[in-house]
Image (spheres, rainbow, N blue to C red):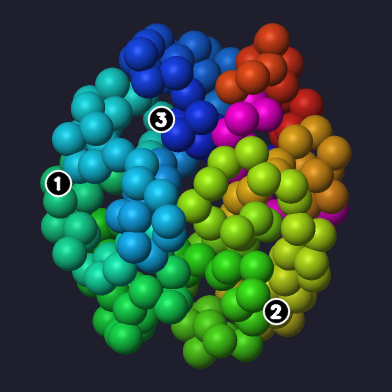
Amino acid sequence: MVKILPSLLASDFAKLGEDIRKMEEAGADIFHLDIMDGQFVPNISYGLPVVEAISRTASIPLDVHLMTHEPEQFIDEFSRMDISMVSFHIEATNHPHRLMQRIQESGMKAGIVLNPHTPVSLIEHLLPEIDFILIMTVNPGFGGQKFIGSGVLKIEQLDALRQENDYGYEIEVDGGINDETAGICRAAGADLLVSGSHLFKSEDWKAAVSRMKG
């Protein structure tokens, strides 16, 4: 069964602690945290103090998605916060293999993010060692966008490479994930599904999480 990762950027920040508790009770597996710097993407989300507060409150693992230039600068801080997973965009660093190793040596799972325009071929040399790949099925930086169907081909491609080579990475998908697109991604081979506005706007969070798990 796939794991569901509510994106906390879509929560109500006036009652963040309550939303975290309710989403955990609804069956969420991992919380997804989008970190935006206003430069790599044209938006700003939240910084390290908010992440630290979330880490103290949540009882399930945290998955940090860095939409920032120079993602190297944050690794030590996240390691101290007991973050479980950290992903970065291949375009954001000149040394992706070194950064991947640094994340792993810090006790966290390392992930590479593929934007809608980024081909799988750009990261094939990292696949034997990477822990997970995050496929963006929207353009990064804004919530509530429509699912880009071409991302399904990348899921299928990565799943095929994983099976052919006995790789151990997981496939995560983020962007426009709802009941329908969750089923499409599951069928293509996805393991982790990120959902923001669809989950948090649902009337029954437990039922919404259950439907997305299939």
- Image location (x, y in percent) of residue 110: 39, 64
Q: Residue at x 53, y 83 (%)?
A: 123
Q: Which mark is residue 80?
A: 1
Q: Which residue is at the front of the view, 185 or 189?
A: 185
Q: Residue at x 46, y 41 (%)?
A: 32
Q: Is residue 96 above or below residue 47?
A: below
Local packing at callout 1 (Cα closer than 10 Å; few below 14, some 14-19, many 20+) is few
Q: Which residue is at the front of the view, 73 or 209?
A: 73
**Residue 191 lies in magenta, yes or no?**
yes
Q: Which residue is at the front of the view, 156 or 204?
A: 204
Q: Which residue is at the front of the view, 208 or 60?
A: 208
Q: Does dot 3 land on a helix, a strand or a loop?
A: loop
- For badge 1, the amino acid type reads Arg
Q: CA distance from mark 2 to mark 3?
A: 30 Å
Q: Going from the N terminus, do you reach mark 1 or mark 2 first?
A: 1
Q: Which mark is residue 16?
A: none
* Marks 2 and 3 close (CB-CB < 8 Å): no
Q: Does dot 2 land on a helix, a strand or a loop?
A: helix
- Image location (x, y in percent) of residue 118: 60, 77
> Position of 159 compared to 78: left or right?
right
Residue underneath mark 2: 161
Range drawn in magenta: 186-199
Q: Does dot 1 land on a helix, a strand or a loop?
A: helix
Residue underneath mark 3: 60
